Image: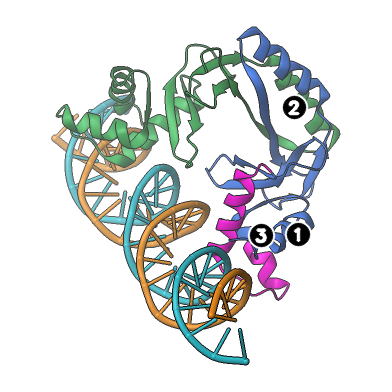
Chain colours: A green, B blue, C cyan, D orange
Amino acid sequence: MSKSLPAVITTLERAGGFASAQEVFQLMRKQGKSTGLATVYRALQKAVSENTVDVLRKDDGEALYRLCATGHHHHLVCTSCGKTVEVEGSAVEKWANTVAKNNGFKKVSHVVELFGLCQKC
Amino acid sequence: MSKSLPAVITTLERAGGFASAQEVFQLMRKQGKSTGLATVYRALQKAVSENTVDVLRKDDGEALYRLCATGHHHHLVCTSCGKTVEVEGSAVEKWANTVAKNNGFKKVSHVVELFGLCQKC
DNA sequence: ATTGATATTGATAATCATTATCATTTCTGG
DNA sequence: CCAGAAATGATAATGATTATCAATATCAAT
């Protein structure tokens, strides 16, 4: 499950490092790369699980994938212009794990997103 | 577009103030309230636009709605049975504000939800 | 009360991203 | 080579959300 991954990642780079699965698929098609939609999804999921790609959701629920340099982090998104800042959150990580343990939960994941208005807006 | 809104909000309250549109719909049905799925969606959207309800997304992209009037707290939700625990998060609050300030953001809000498997599941 | 204009509802169909299937192709080691 | 495993990709299935639209409720003004 890995021959396609590099091509997908490369395409994601060319797209500005930020695109939906569908967009990546379309792009690869236009560039002549024969590929299947399912393969694109598989590659992106793999990349996400390896923390080389980051996923977040548009308002309508569509997933957007983005290359991310460093491990796990969260986002600070401008609700007006969409500008996004990557934010480190090890403090939140610890907090989440503690809370989970205190309540007997396992396999915890968390969703942490910050919204606000950036300087320009 | 408002006769159904109260009923929807009430149901959302009964659900612990935290549920998906589909769940709200099912609940209303079980309680004998005749209603349509589309109406539930419309009511929830209205509520969101009026800031009486808050929306966030599960990992699979499904939208979860939650009352945002009742104090501010977070949730630890079992992804299997749906059991929900309310969690205090002043630590996260502080963190969010600090991060926002450091990046020049104002009017910050945040979405923090924890998911995992509870003891039974 | 009765009309007529307007807004709301809700069943149903349409949309669209994401997943599952599965036959086919491509790799791999022996 | 060759079998077996892994990867691919076309296609179908899933499931949440949205659009459609006829039927119904609301309400102001006569």
Disc nearer the start of the sequence (3/1): 3
Image coordinates of residue B31 in percent, x first then y, are 73, 72
Q: Residue at x 19, y 33 (%)?
A: A29
Q: Amino acid at mark 2?
A: Ala
Q: Is A105 rendered above or below residue B21?
A: above
Asked if the residue under mark 1 is in contact with the one under mark 2, i.e. CB atoms within 8 Å, the reply is no
Residue B8 lies in the magenta-colored region? no
Seen from the viewer's position, the closer of residues C15 and B76 is C15
Give the secondary structure at mark 1: helix
Q: Amino acid at mark 1?
A: Thr
Q: Which residue is mark 1?
A: B10
Q: Is residue A58 left or right of residue B98?
A: left
Image coordinates of residue A15 in percent, x first then y, are 30, 21
Q: Is residue A11 left or right of residue A53?
A: left
Labels 2 and 3 share a subunit = no
Q: Residue at x 71, y 60 (%)?
A: B6
Give the image quarter of residue B105.
top right
Instruction: Tell me the crowding category of disc 1: few under 14, some 14 to 19, or many 20 or more residues within 10 angstroms, Cα based.
Output: few
Q: Which residue is mark 2?
A: A96
Frontmost of labels 2 and 1 is 1
Q: Which residue is mark 3?
A: B5
Q: Residue at x 48, y 19 (%)?
A: A83
